[in-house]
Image (cartoon, grey):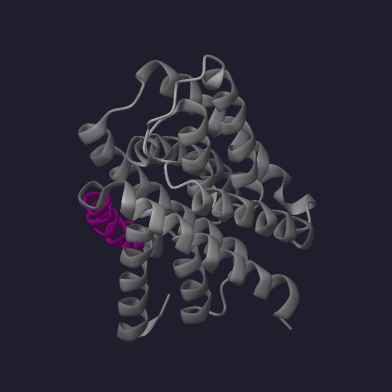
Amino acid sequence: MDLGLSGWAILTFGAAAAGWVDAVIGGGGLILIPLIMAVAPGLLPANALATNKFAAVTGTSSAAVTLVRKVGVDTSLTLRMIPVAAVCSGMGALMAASISKDVMRPIVIILMLIAGLFVALRPDFGQGNSTHKSWGRAVALIAVAAIALYDGIFGPGTGMFLIMAFTALLSQDFIRSAALAKVINTATNIGALCVFIAAGHILWKLGIILAIANIAGAQLGARTVLGGGTRLLRAALLTLVVVMSIYLAQQQWFNG
């Protein structure tokens, strides 16, 4: 693949930026996938999606390790969530071709705006001050299954939805929810990635280079989260809601 020096530089920088964004709140694919398609316009969309997914797996998993080491997660619950997330994401990837993106986008926009409004109107949300709900763990498992299925089918905002679900259902602060979300998001990425590998869609040379850059960005992002705390994640979540809603609306109603 002849991308030229400038093409490789753009994609490497873009992968690092995507890794940082994914580690902080999620949505790095909004940066890297369009860049891959722009720099290598001859690629099939499936190749761009699969190669991005490979880079995202490496970056997200490295951020997960860093965050979990610092803040910890509920090991028992996490070990139950991981296989559920991987299997449901793989199922979603298999279903993706049969579900119209034109149907998914408006639903996701509405859900994102509701989530953003909820966070904006609840200043205490994400502080970890609420009482733990006895049924929260069971419902969190169901939420993981649903979000993982969505990630395999469509994907945008998966990290944000996981953070929101864990914060609400497990009465955690944003930082601890972000750590768990990175672990589960790694599992959903691996589930979908297995489908892409089986289909032969990944461009390995490009993917490995982007993965290295993505890991560097993800490590910086994880340290940004730990340094910025709940206030940073709250601001990042609201920013992602606005950016993602505009992006999806443009794709739905103004793209040609």
Which is nearer the eye, 207 or 239? 239
Which is nearer the eye, 85 or 166? 166
Dominant SS type (magenta): helix
Residue 180 seen in render: yes
**Residue 142 in magenta?**
no
Q: Is residue 93 above or below residue 130?
A: below
Q: Is residue 47 above or below residue 79?
A: below
For the N terminus, give its image quadrant.
bottom left
Q: Is residue 247 above or below residue 222?
A: below
Which is nearer the eye, 14 or 75? 75
Residue 44 seen in render: no
- Label tally: 0
**Residue 213 in magenta?**
yes
Write the residue at 56% across / 32% down.
Answer: 144
Q: Position of residue 203 (x, y in %)?
A: 46, 61
Write the residue at 52% across / 68% down.
Answer: 243
Q: Position of residue 253 (x, y in %)?
A: 75, 75
Write the residue at 69% across / 56% down.
Answer: 110
Q: Position of residue 234 (x, y in %)?
A: 40, 52
For the C terminus, give its image quadrant.
bottom right
Q: Magenta residues, as a range?
A: 209-225
Q: Is residue 186 above or below residue 243?
A: above
**Quadrant of res 210:** bottom left
**Quadrant of res 85:** top right
Write the residue at 60% across / 49% down.
Answer: 199
**Quadrant of res 183:** top left
Q: Position of residue 176 (x, y in %)?
A: 34, 35
